[in-house]
Amino acid sequence: MTFRQLLHTTVFLSGASATVLGLLVVLYAQIKGEPTPALISAGWWVIAAGIGIHTGRMEAANPQIARVLAQARAANELEEPRPVLTMVNRLWPLFLVTILSGVASIWFPQVAGVATGFLLIWALAWRKQEHAVQAIEERDGVEFRVERTGPTQPLKLIRMPGLRRDRPEHKRQSTAGV
């Protein structure tokens, strides 16, 4: 699985988890007739969305991604791709938070409301990182792939040779004498 695919999937699943948990809060308010948890959560979601948008506004790779990219080891052979296993190994904390928050929302909707806000921050803060990595890959003519590691080990990348994109040089045209 490429690193860009993992980033894309992370943002997508974080947003989907936030949506499901937010829906559980609203359903609780509707079923129990208690709008207070939903109203307080909605306020938190607006604040969280603002934080996520502000944090994710940069076009460059954030420091954590830049560090992981810099530590990528070079390789010429591709391992057997296992995208589902890679996704489960890397995103298990997201799945765990979603499931536990969803179950807790049966009795305490505030748990799902708070988790929704943090998942919104996560999704919005990381939304442009895929494009930053793509720009680095195109510039350097490489492709970053996720190395197979255990679920509790840090993320490691493999730098594979890729296709370098040649861009024509822009020459300045003189307008003097025209």
Image: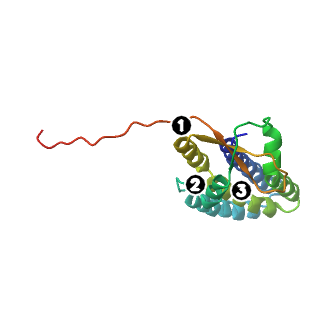
Characterize the local packing of mark 3: few (<14), some (14-19) or many (20 or more) Cα atoms within 10 angstroms: many
Dot 2 amino acid type: Ala
Where does residue 163 sit, x and y in percent of width and height? 57, 34
Characterize the local packing of mark 1: few (<14), some (14-19) or many (20 or more) Cα atoms within 10 angstroms: few
Image quarter of the N terminus: top right
Dot 1 amino acid type: Arg
Image quarter of the C terminus: top left
Q: Nearer the viewer, mark 1 or mark 2?
A: 1
Which residue is the site of mark 2?
61
Q: Is residue 35 at least partly visible in the picture?
A: no
Q: Is residue 40 above or below residue 135?
A: below
**Tag 1, which secondary structure?**
loop
| Residue 167 falls left or right of residue 56 | left
Quarter occupied by residue 29: bottom right
Quarter occupied by residue 162: top right
**First in sequence: mark 3 vs mark 2:** 2
**Tag 3, which secondary structure?**
helix
**Residue 84 versus residue 48: which sits nearer the camera?**
84
Where does residue 177 sit, x and y in percent of width and height? 11, 41
